[in-house]
Structures are given as C-alpha cells and as structure tokens.
Image (cartoon, rainbow, N blue to C red):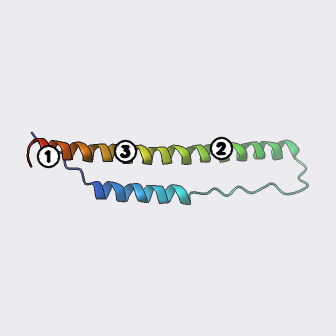
Amino acid sequence: MNEIKLDVAQVEQKLLFLNETIANLHIDIQEPPVGQSLMNFSEKINEINQNMKQIFQTYQQLAEQHVKSTKLVVESLEEAEKNSAKNFNI
C-alpha cells in the first residue's frame, strides 16, 4: 500500500498566497460621463456595473470559504495522520 504524504507547510503556503490574491482583487468600474444623452445606455451600463460588483463580491466570499474549508480538511488529515502513527507506534 502506498503512503499519502501530506506536506502541510506547502498547502498552508499556497492557501496564504490564495488569501492574499483574493484580498488584492479589485475591479475598476468607471461611471458614465455626466450629461450623456443616451440614458438607456447609461442605465444599462450602471446595471451591468452593479451586477459585476455583486458577482465579484460573491466570488471573493466563495474563494475565502474555500480557503477556510481547505484549512479544516488539512488540519483533519494532519490529526488523522498523527492518530494513525500513534496506533502503529511510529
């Protein structure tokens, strides 16, 4: 039977990098010029901008939840590995 080696430090490093990347995500949305004669166009752009902001925020939240879940799984695997080692007197 092959052993699964869990490199906790590497996983934690990658999760830290992912967290930093998530925190640094930003979106630049420019407002339409004042006095624009195409009101429908302006309204649609504003609606799209709001949708993009909401999608962006949802993505950030989901990515942060993913990082937290992954950390919990890694901790659980690490604990299981320790318990297995105790049971086999390693």
Relative image position of residue 73 (x, y in whole percent): 34, 43
Q: Nearer the viewer, mark 2 or mark 1?
A: 1
Q: Nearer the viewer, mark 2 or mark 3?
A: 3
Residue reaching furthest top? Answer: 1
From the viewer's side, name the closer residue of 86 and 37.
86
Taking the spot 42% from the left edge, 59% from the top edge, the residue there is: 17
Q: Secondary structure at mark 1?
A: helix
Q: Left of 57 or right of it: where is 67?
A: left
Q: Earlier in the sequence, mark 1 or mark 3?
A: 3
Could you say which disc has been placed on residue 85 in the image? Answer: 1
Q: Earlier in the sequence, mark 2 or mark 1?
A: 2
Q: CA distance from mark 2 to mark 1?
A: 47 Å
Q: Left of 90 or right of it: where is 35?
A: right
Relative image position of residue 21 (x, y in whole percent): 49, 58
From the viewer's side, name the closer residue of 83 and 60.
83
The reply to whether dot 1 and dot 3 touch (C-beta < 8 Å) is: no
The reply to whether dot 2 and dot 1 touch (C-beta < 8 Å) is: no
Relative image position of residue 7 (x, y in whole percent): 25, 54
The residue pinned by badge 3 equals 72
Q: CA distance from mark 1 to mark 3?
A: 20 Å
Q: Earlier in the sequence, mark 2 or mark 3?
A: 2
**Split into 4 quadrants, where in the image is the N terminus?**
top left
Q: CA distance from mark 2 to mark 3?
A: 27 Å
